[in-house]
Amino acid sequence: MKLRICHLYGNLMNTYGDNGNLLMLQYTAKESGYEVETEIVSVGDDLDTSRYDLIFFGGGQDYEQSVVSRDLQTKKEALCAYIEAGGVILGICGGFQLLGKYYQTLKGETYPGIGAIDFYTISKKDRLIGDTEMYSDRFQETYFGYENHAGRTYLGDKVQGLGRTVQGYGNNDDDKVEGVVYKNAFGSYFHGPFLVRNPHFAQRLVDLAMNKEAQIKN
Ligand code: GLN
């Protein structure tokens, strides 16, 4: 059996070692007895989600996000349908932000996301930087990471965070919520890389990606 990974904008969105998440997914899948195939889908490419079991969307600086935000509108419909159907996706930092409605920069420019999940992000002057820790009530697990972002993310009333911030900031400097979870779509501000620091989460993603029945139930 083969795990087919899509590295969404992998040549543009890869700050703070996010490519390590890809290496970790490949390692975890191989340890679980699967073959692995990874493809970068980037600007100008068609996104055929039926070709993938798992999508990874890493972080990036504002300039890269502006380019990606524009192109993403051509992939929005496919990505939203994939997420609604229970497809597995992990977005980190800049990638996480673009799963929501929009990301507004310090200069006041607004980069549209795909709006697959009800949240938005607005930048403020002091960046949120440092080591982080969250506790996920849903999975009853602790995750560690590192954050560096200007964006403050605010989840809609019905939307669940991935965890509660124990150390650092997470989504913003107000509500102590970190990341997002909707069906099998996950977002987090944790670099680290996240999956290398939290192998149990990498295992969860691989298991979910390879078990289509569990995907639909979530
Ligand atoms: N440019 C975004 C921000 O500063 C995302 C940064 C990142 O992905 N590290 O909030």
Image (cartoon, rainbow, N blue to C red):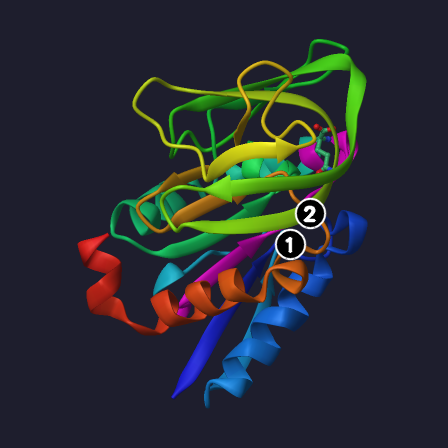
Drawn side of residue 176 relative to residue 109, left or right: left
Q: Is residue 55 visible?
A: yes
Can residue 179 be seen here? no
Q: Badge 1: few (under 14), some or many (20 or more) residues near its Cα, within 10 Å?
A: many
Front-most of residues 22 and 51 = 22
Q: Nearer the viewer, residue 108 or 206?
A: 206
Q: Is residue 185 above or below residue 109?
A: below
User: Does residue 106 sit above or below 162 in this rendering?
Assistant: above
Residue at screen point 28% across, 72% down: 211
Towards the viewer: 15 or 167:
167
Quadrant where ligand 1 appears: top right
Residue 146, image quadrant: top right
Name the residue at 46% across, 90% down: 33
Near mark 2 (Cα within 10 A), the count class, few <14, some 14-19 or many ≥20, is many
Residue annotated with mark 1:
194
The quadrant the N terminus occupies is bottom left
Q: Position of residue 139 (x, y in %)?
A: 39, 51
The magenta segment is: 51-65
Q: Amino acid at mark 2?
A: Gly
C-alpha gap between disc 1 and disc 2? 6 Å
Question: Which labelled disc corresponds to residue 145?
Answer: 2
Q: Is residue 178 left or right of residue 190?
A: left
90 lies above or below 69: below
Q: Amino acid at mark 1?
A: Phe
Q: Are marks 1 and 2 in contact (CB under 8 Å)?
A: yes
* Residue 114 shown in magenta: no
Front in this rendered view, residue 51 or 101: 101
In magenta segment, residue 59 = yes
Question: What is the number of the mark on residue 79?
Answer: none
Helix, strand or loop at label 2? It is strand
Circle 1: element type: helix
